[in-house]
Amino acid sequence: MLTMQDALLTLTRYWTERGCMIVQPFNTEVGAGTYNPATILRVLGGEPWRVAYVEPSVRPDDSRYGLNPNRLQTHTQFQVILKPDPGDPQELYLGSLRALGVDTAAHDVRFVEDNWTSPALGAWGLGWEVWLDGQEITQFTYFQQAGGQSLDPVSVEITYGIERIMMALQEVRHFAEIAYAPGASYGEVFGQAEFEMSRYYLDEADIDAVRRMYGEFAAEARRLLDARLPVPAHSYVLKCSHAFNILDSRGAVSTTERATSFAQMRGMSREVATLWRERRVELGSPLGETPRPAPAVPAAVDPAAVPSGPATLLFEIGTEELPAAEVGRQTEAVRAALVERLAGTRLAHGSVLVRGTPRRIVAVVEEVAVREPDVEQVVRGPRRSAAYDAQGEPTKAATGFVRGQGAAVADLTVVEHRGVEHVALVRTDTGRPAIEVLAEVLGAVLTGLRSERNMRWNDPELSFSRPVRWVVALLGGSVVPVAVSTLAAGTTSRGHRRAGSPPIEVRGADGYAELLAASSVLLDPAARRELIVDEATKLAAEQHGVIDLELEADVIDEVTNLVEYPRPVLGSFERRYLELPPEILTTVMHKHQRYLAVRDTAGALQPCFVTVADGAVEVPLVRAGNEAVLRSRFEDAAFFFDADLKVPLATFRKGLAKLTFEQRLGSVADRADRIAALAGRLADRLGSSAGAGLSALDRATLDRAGELAKFDLATQMVIELSSLAGTMAREYARRAGEPEAVAVALYEMELPRRAGGTLPRTVPGALLALADRLDLLTGLFALDAAPTGSSDQFGLRRAALGVTAILAGRPELAGLTVADMLAEAAKLLPVPVSETALEQADAFVRGRFTQQLLDAGADHRLVGALRPLTGRPARAASTLRELRTLADSPDFARLAAAVGRVRRIVPAEAAPGIVIGDLVDPADHRLAQVATELSRQLVVRSSGRAPELADFVAVAGQLPEAVEAFFDAVMVMADDPAVRAARLGLLAEIRDVAAEVLDWDALGTLPITLAGPADGT
């Protein structure tokens, strides 16, 4: 059996044979091998650096007294840094697994998106978790920044989790069972230390003493920075970090202290990084500088292989594993770029089809012409009369024109432009061969690749979601000579990673998909999804269960783009775990493992699951590995659940004071207090509006739920699985004996979780949910932290949609307006909120609602007409439904035309009012009578509320005829000032009454023929 000691020696030997030097663990506690100076300092600057070392990593928060099978306060990492990126780091890493005895062809080894960031170090990178049969065993990262400095060259960081690897290799269930050395288990060697250090971190650490040490360490780090000694200064920054982590594990860090300490450590880390680089330059960069990679040379084109007629273009962009969400985005982006670039040429072509997998984006363009057609271009010069003198000789104007065009006078011809003769040159612009055009087009597509988060690797020019490692470009059987930076297109693709990514020679687009399929790569995502659904359904049926395709849709969509050739595998777990709340089990399966849950026909969970491996794996191996991982995950969940049940809800609520929300807006406890207060004020507004207000029971529910608001954010379960916020509040409240209505309200305050999601069903839940989102929106807009571009750190777009969805879906809340609620929320904030900020927040919420209606398929003219109503989403939604039934009605078209005619003629500054004594024509009096009756009936019908479209249409039947007769009979702008003012006042009266109902101008010409859904909401 390979012992843990053997594994460390094997990795050391493997990486030294590949050019790494071996250094020692750092001599103070670090939370990860990243913090060792051999990584965090050496990745800075241009010096090459290849290193490997073992690093005991200490994380007080992971203390579990040695009871949890996977969690340790000190775990062993093996750290590798490759600077610069060697170009094949994944292949090197997989070779190291094989050296450890992992059969990468039999096991399910996968690279799953996991981006790393350390605000305290000013460092971040993009990369993956590496999974071995579902177990995370390695963090693989392309370092992009450290100490606040962008890195050039980029380093590859590989961090092995040794205990997890050994548990998988030795097939043991608990870290203590690992064979560490011959005759000695891990538990025998380290079990005592694990228990005693857990006791220290969780129970015994002297808070005052550790806090004093933090201050002393920070002071010493500051002194060493001033002395320009970056290495010892870094050591003391690490000591600060460890002291802080001890305080945090003891629950002794306040919101203010957390923010202050993070800022202090981040600032010192950046100073260390800057000083380190300065010192290396002063020392003359002893290890030299990393050379720039050579640019690629375009492939030679064989003239005999160039098609003589229309041919199919194949363009494959080969990458390291893309994030699942990027696969779909990039297929669309590449298609759009190709269509746009081709449209900028004269090259004829047929359909453009783009499909993708995690490792390739592939475009196929049919019927590409051999070359662009020739076109004649006429370059117009001066007038003929100015180009020749009286003797017919060319003038300076003519000779200057032809000289500037590189032509001769003899080439001139005469053309007519707008009835005037000009001299001109007619040129033939010869079309370029398709190969030449496509080389330019495909090069531009490659250069323009962008994702939501971009990274760099060993290519000096390209930037993309993950490294691009190969390109195939073929027109028929001829290579297209694309060359961008270090990449040159060729004819060689790569097969499935399970088979070692073997080279695949591609002869052309014809049969390409079948060629990939023979190498275990399914290019079509629809085919991958269908295979997953069909096989998972069959496996579930073997256990008399089902896969709920609606509940599992998100996981299926994600897994479809995590694999190139799906291989569903059925696994099981012990029935005793079904005693945990089902939401915990499904969250663990979905969020952590991307498993499909198996249910019975009534929807109850069964003790089995389906995982989707990638490629032709050995099913028993993969099943056993995934079952072991899920068992550990469920054990963790059970640990958190049991621990949480021992704590009173009020204690959790007080614990929110230790959680940071935003420094200027206070702690999570402060925010929860504001939510409770705002929900109460909104309830008071309901009582004072036309509605009946809350019942006594609902008010009592709201008040009690407000006292407990957000308490579950302090529970271990929600800290570990944040998506269970609300769900665990309901569960813990029920178990603590709270009324069911309170438990439901606590759950519903987190709804909706996404656009189109489930809405609160109770008024207390809806009010708390509104207050939650309104506090967030008002606070962040007050701090000028509105979303920009794709950046929305605090989820304000989702919050805005939540507000409008709740208001639109709860008729009891129709009396509440967005602007009024935001203003109420502003009164509770600890920071000043300007009128501008409130106006921006109101416009943002209303704008999101408008966009949601458009996205749902509502006609843009109807949505535009709702502009005055978007601050009352319920009314806007009902008005939209009415508009859709009225839009093609001739009677409504006549009414809208009449109102539109009134609005067009009345100046904006005209004041409304009906002065009968100054109206002299019968048509004046008729319109005044209709307008007066219209206003009276609207008041009666609306009973004090704002009139709605249905009210207006019901009582405005006589308005079109009266308006038409008025305009036919009188001149509005009469010579008599009193008559003119009276007529304008009458029209302004109609304008203002109608303006409360719709923005009539946005309707345009009616009737409107509508297509699509009957309700845009």
Image: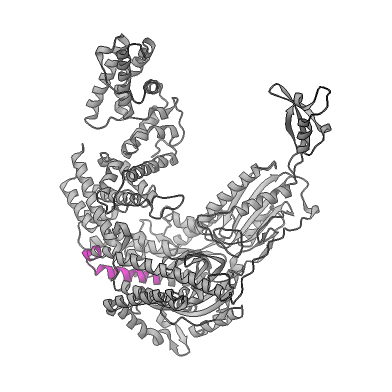
Q: Residue furthest bottom?
A: 183
> Based on the displayed image, in which of its 4 quarters is residue 902 positioned?
top left
Foreground of the two, 770 or 828: 828
Residue 807 highlighted magenta (yes or no): no
Characterize the magenta stretch by its predominant secondary structure.
Answer: helix
Foreground of the two, 519 or 678: 678
Position of 70 relative to 927 (above/below)? below
Position of 979 relative to 504 (above/below)? above
> Based on the displayed image, in which of its 4 quarters is residue 491 positioned?
bottom right
Give the percent coordinates (x, y) of residue 164: 46, 76
Give the percent coordinates (x, y) of residue 255: 30, 64
Give the percent coordinates (x, y) of residue 188: 39, 87
In the image, which residues are magenta? 632-653
Left or right of residue 232: residue 514: right
Q: Is residue 69 visible?
A: no
Left or right of residue 813: residue 588: right
Position of 671 relative to 640 (above/below)? above
Position of 900 relative to 584 (above/below)? above
